[in-house]
Image (cartoon, helix red, strand yellow):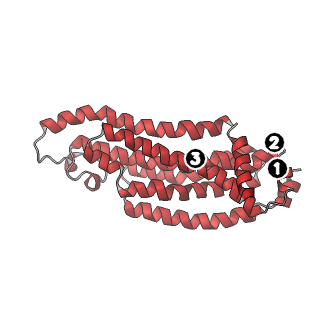
Amino acid sequence: MDKIKTIIGKEWSEVFKNRLVLFSVAFLPLFFIILPLLTIAGTSGINDEVVQAAPADTNFTETSGLPGAEAYCQGLTELECVQVYTINLFSFMFMILPVAIPVTIAAYSVVGEKAARSLEPLLATPITTIELLTGKALAAAIPAVLATWFSYLIYAFIAYFLATPLVFKAILQPMWLLAIFVVGPLLTLLAVCVAIIVSSRVTDPRVAEQLSMVVMLPIIMIIIGQSIGVVLLDSTMVILLGAVVLVLDIVLGYISIRAFQRENILTRWK
């Protein structure tokens, strides 16, 4: 455990000197916090006027024109329906954070050290491959998970003062809590495993980062599918996504250990 802690401290002292890493950890979560809050704040005043003008039994589910509106908008006004639908899109965008942040750290963890000529002394120490990769994986995963959790909590806290009670309820529905606090860390492990595998096989840190970013494509495709009505995000889909990612974590974790061959890395990169 002491060796793993040492690796984590060493990784953080080095990678956070990289401006791209600092941007992804600090400013990327800020962007995902501000964007949905601006949407809520920009429509709240209009929403109040509509609520006051509409009859008490008005339900805009059938006239909202949003894909899957009947699943989200029962008992809501039209603009509340739009807000909830938009919030669901933005909430799933928070799932990009646990993938994008660790990729920039983990992709640098192997090939970046090779470029800085600090990998050879590390591999010459008595630390095992599992301890080394565990330390590097945790060094990438911990900032990503904490940034995702804290940014979502800050977003929910501010939204409490901006949104109507029904809209705020949609932000804290169990589906999103499961996605952020359970599936999010699983996605982080997936991104770390992919980044370590790629980083173990290439010789350029920029190439490693670009190839590792491919892991973000499924999340982006789901967001696009939801926005055009092809995919409907619900609890079943979140649970299914978590189960698939868990299986991939186990498989790719094994592959990443097998792919990290200390002797071959040193001799191939001489």
CA–CA distance in space, label 2 to label 1: 8 Å
- The image's mark for residue 227 is none
Image quarter where the N terminus lies is bottom right
Q: Residue at x 73, y 61 (%)?
A: 131
> Where is residue 55, by image quadrant?
top left
Q: Which residue is mark 2?
A: 116
Q: Nearer the viewer, residue 257 or 149?
A: 149
CA–CA distance in space, label 3 to label 1: 24 Å
3 and 1 marks in contact (CB < 8 Å): no
Categorize mark 2 by other alpha carbons within 10 Å: few (<14), some (14-19), many (20+). Answer: few
Please provide percent x and percent y for residue 206: 71, 42
Residue 208 showing in the rendered view: no
Which of marks 2 and 3 precedes in the sequence? 3
**Is label 2 in a helix, a strand or a loop?**
loop
Categorize mark 3 by other alpha carbons within 10 Å: few (<14), some (14-19), many (20+). Answer: many
Q: Residue at x 17, y 39 (%)?
A: 51
User: Is residue 247 found left or right of 49 in the rendered image?
Assistant: right
Circle 3 or circle 1, nearest the eye: 1
Q: Which residue is mark 1?
A: 119
Please provide percent x and percent y for residue 45: 25, 31
